[in-house]
Amino acid sequence: MILQTVVALGPVIGLIALGYGIRARAFLAPSFWPPAERLCYFVLLPALFINGTATADLGGLPIAFMAPVLAGPVVLTALGLVVAQRWLDLDGPAFTSVLQGSIRFNNYLGLSIALALFGPDGVALAAIANTILVPLVNVVCTLGFARYGAERLTVGRTVRSIATNPLILGCVIGIGLNVTGIGLPPGVEGLVRTLGAASLPLGLLCVGAALELRSMGRNLGAVGLATAVKFVVMPGLGLAGCLLVGLTGEPAATVILFLSLPTASSAYVMARALGGDSRLMASIITLQTVAGILYLPVVFLVIRAFTG
């Protein structure tokens, strides 16, 4: 089991390390990485979601059980943090970074691990998890910025930010093509599948390139809080939810996996754009990503218990 874990995580860890090494050695110009992240976020990853949901057998997936078990921990965690905010020694922008670090997740890691664990079925399960979580997490984080960020958002800007999110649009398009029976035409399917396949290696390289190891020592109290919530509270609530509704097998494993993932590097972009504490956000992202490499094998052991 340990060997299987190492084999499954090996390519993920290797690509992250390679991305960090390329950035640290300045093998590529620093200006390369922002456009690469933008390409992944706006084109490649949505293509992967479209292909995964448009071609999946959605009727065979327990979506009705997965949805509340995925959404519940996000909502409960966010509400708990909002209630606790008055007792936390954090200003508004810092609180938005803790909120993002507690509920946002790294799509590239989740998709890569789901694919390694479950093969093509893992992409469909991951796409369903993203369909449920991406809109919810973005709504919650955007509302958090609207209330606590340095730049208060208008209702129109909040709605526009959610409605134009490329990951949400990719999920909606894919599900629409699936449920209507239209699907992806042969020529288009090959193009979308190829674009989606490019998202994971490039995305993981970008994750590694975004690491700022020197930032991990900043504001350890806030960083530790976000990390504890992300790695203990969120998956704990997910595990309890699975047991409560009787969700087992690969769908339950997917729920636990996605609720256990380190926060996404895109959280830093949002923190800068919407009035959050970007320095604190960089610290949270880096610590969770590095710690996640050691933590995710533990998650694998839990997942194996659900999948047999």
Image: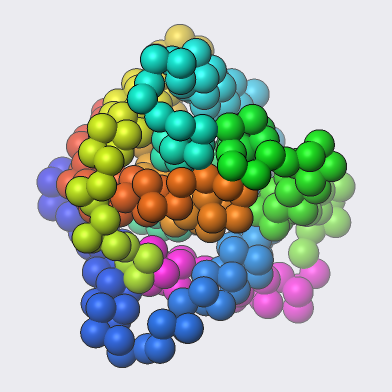
Using residue 41 as the reference point, say whether residue 277 is left or right of it.
Answer: left
Q: Quick check: can you spot residue 127?
A: no
Number of numbered markers: 0
Q: Quadrant of the N terminus?
A: top left
In-front residue for pair 265/249: 265
- Residue 110 % position (x, y): 43, 49
Q: Residue at x 50, y 39 (%)?
A: 93
User: Is 72 above or below relative to 133?
Assistant: above
Q: Residue furthest top?
A: 244
User: Is 107 above or below relative to 68?
Assistant: below
Q: Residue at x 65, y 53 (%)?
A: 167
Residue 71 in which image quadrant: top right
Q: Residue at x 29, y 62 (%)?
A: 212
Q: Residue at x 31, y 89 (%)?
A: 27
User: Is 272 above or below relative to 300?
Assistant: below
Q: Residue furthest left?
A: 2
What is the magenta segment's predominant secondary structure?
A: helix
Residue 143 in which image quadrant: top right
Residue 8 forms part of the magenta stretch: no
- Residue 242 % position (x, y): 44, 19
User: Is 93 above or below relative to 50?
Assistant: above
Residue 189 forms part of the magenta stretch: yes
The region drawn magenta spans 185-207
- Residue 308 % position (x, y): 29, 32
